[in-house]
Amino acid sequence: MKARINARAVLALASASAIAVTGVLVAPAHAATRTTAIVVESNTLTSLNSGTPANNIVINGDVGYLTGMGLYHYDDKLNIVPNTVLGGYKVTKNTAKDFEVTYTVNPGRVWSDGAPITAVDYLLSHVLQSTDYAKKAGLPDPSNADVTPAFDSGAYGAVYDTHNLGLPTLSADKMSITVRYDSQIPDYVLNGGINTPFPVHALELIAAGKKSLPSVAEAQAATDKFYTDVNTYNTASLKAMGAVYNTGYDMTATSSSTNPLLLVNNGAYLVSSIDANQIKLTLNPKYNSGPATSGLDTIVIKQGIADGSPSAQALANKDIDVYQGQPTADTVAQLKAISSATVVATSSLAYEHIELRVASSDGTPYTGPFAKSGGQKAADLRKAFLLAYPRQEIVEKLMKPINPNAVVLGSTWTLPGNPSYADVSANNASGVYNAGTQAARTAAALKLVKKWYPSAGNGTTPVSINLLWGSPGNTRRTSEAALIIAAEKQAGFAVTAPATSGWGGKLASSKYDAHFFIFDQTAVPQDAQACGTFQTTGGSNYTGYSSARVDADCTQLQAKTLPTGTIRRLQIDAERQINADAFFLGIFQNPEVTAYTTGLQNIKPAPLSPSLFWNFWEWKF
């Protein structure tokens, strides 16, 4: 599942007292007239741009969703809802080899600095996704794993990149942009890569060294320059803007010296301040890009609260209004005991998984025990590690107390509750990792390890594994890591798994042999967003995995709309290869637990990310 990593358990731990202290900075949750909602996130913000692989974590995306408005969103019933306030999209040519989609911006839409929003603001999407464009513009080839792209978007190699037919064209008034494809791509709204505009005038101005908001005329001139730079393939200008895109928006705090151009956006809320404890967002006075808000002037995100118990206590104390995260069973019980709160438990389209590195994905050679270059030895070690992985124990001890119906996943291309799940999981060759008891699987794992390390077993652990999993303070993840270390020791693996702050930015690092975390689905396209994880060029392929068979299956899934039976067949075929290559297994479907103060209306958690915030404009007291 592409592009969104659930990092609900990353980065920093704060105590309940810290929540209460910082809570005095905003309107208290028990005030008579409420125009502020206070939300807890277990992440810590790393960037205002979640479009780079290093910053592709939930909290960054959530802040982006609150501050940037696009052409559509998903509701809590998995329906795509067009945003006709901002503009629209339609198919303008529909032939087998020439498929065109036109996106239009409504007149009068403006950025928060007053600059007009035009179709030029969608043109950056092409630069962020087209390998051919990068090559023609003299930028580093995004398909070369040894270099960082000028625009490190993580979106190269996906459907848009594979099927677009060159630079999009703009209408004479620059209010519409038309993209051409070489096939009738399915889910063109999702796969087209054009949804949320980007303030390209701000990007140009920041790259030029500007540190103050422009006049409308200055902004328009910068937008015109961006249009020219893109269409003339201006290498120097593009590289300068790429440097801003890649790291310029990275921040963990704001101050009087923060460049206000970094905060320009078109969403209902704007970032007002960021510090170590919270992110404060206030209404955008120029907002006219989406549905009207319902009464909240301010949303405060208390960040870095990794454990559920402090959050539950803060909710009981009315120091916060909303909690959503990765609670333990004790936390769920604590939440349910709060008389002034409503608790909602749902199943999200997100899953915990374990993935093993097989090759480099950051340009640094990987020669660890699971490296594909290690041949049969590495293949045996990968299979052994997955056989010994205590998935059932994790589900029984950590998930079932929260969700009694939790199961060990047999597929990650389709999840329990989907009509295809039973068929796919029964035929995708995942049974080898579920067969028999865990004791039998661990014995089989040890036998594989002993082929290469005869002394393995009886406390001898000759294979060292560096496991990445998250940050300090997450009780559930800490327990999970402990179970893994103990289980893998029985098969000859010495697993080192310390909590790691900033883990989301380390997933591509060859320093780590394995990772476990949650992939959080943001859409439901025909390829189930799985191809972004398993394709050679996938934006969420953090393991260096490459398979011609999986790539071919993904090509079919992404090229045109297919019958349900064909989709299922391709999913089964891809997963059979993935399971044979022994590098990736699903563990459990993530249970979504949301608790909120009863006075806050219209909280409706959705299966897709951004689950909690999808309808923030409806929130009110």
Image (cartoon, helix red, strand yellow):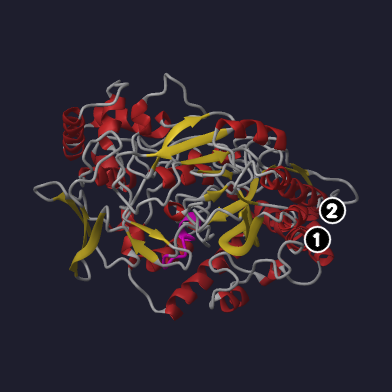
Residue 285: x and y, percent?
Answer: 33, 38
Q: Residues within 10 Å of mark 2 (few under 14, many from 20)?
A: many
Q: Is residue 180 above or below residue 266?
A: below
* Residue pictured at 36% horizontal, 44% vertical: 267
Q: Which residues are magenta?
A: 525-533
Residue 315: x and y, percent?
Answer: 67, 47
| SS at circle 1 | helix
Residue 582: x and y, percent?
Answer: 63, 59
Q: Is residue 405 above or below residue 157?
A: below
Q: Does residue 597 show up?
A: yes
| SS at circle 2 | loop
- Along the viewing direction, whichever of 604 and 168 lies nearer the viewer: 604
Residue placed under numbered mark 2 in the picture = 490
* Residue pictured at 15% horizontal, 49% vertical: 170
Residue at the outermost front position = 32
Disc with the residue nearer the chain's start (1 vs 2): 1
Residue 442 is labelled as 1
Taking the image as shown, residue 319 lies to the left or right of residue 77, namely: right
Task: Determine contact: label 1, label 2, CB under 8 Å.
Answer: yes
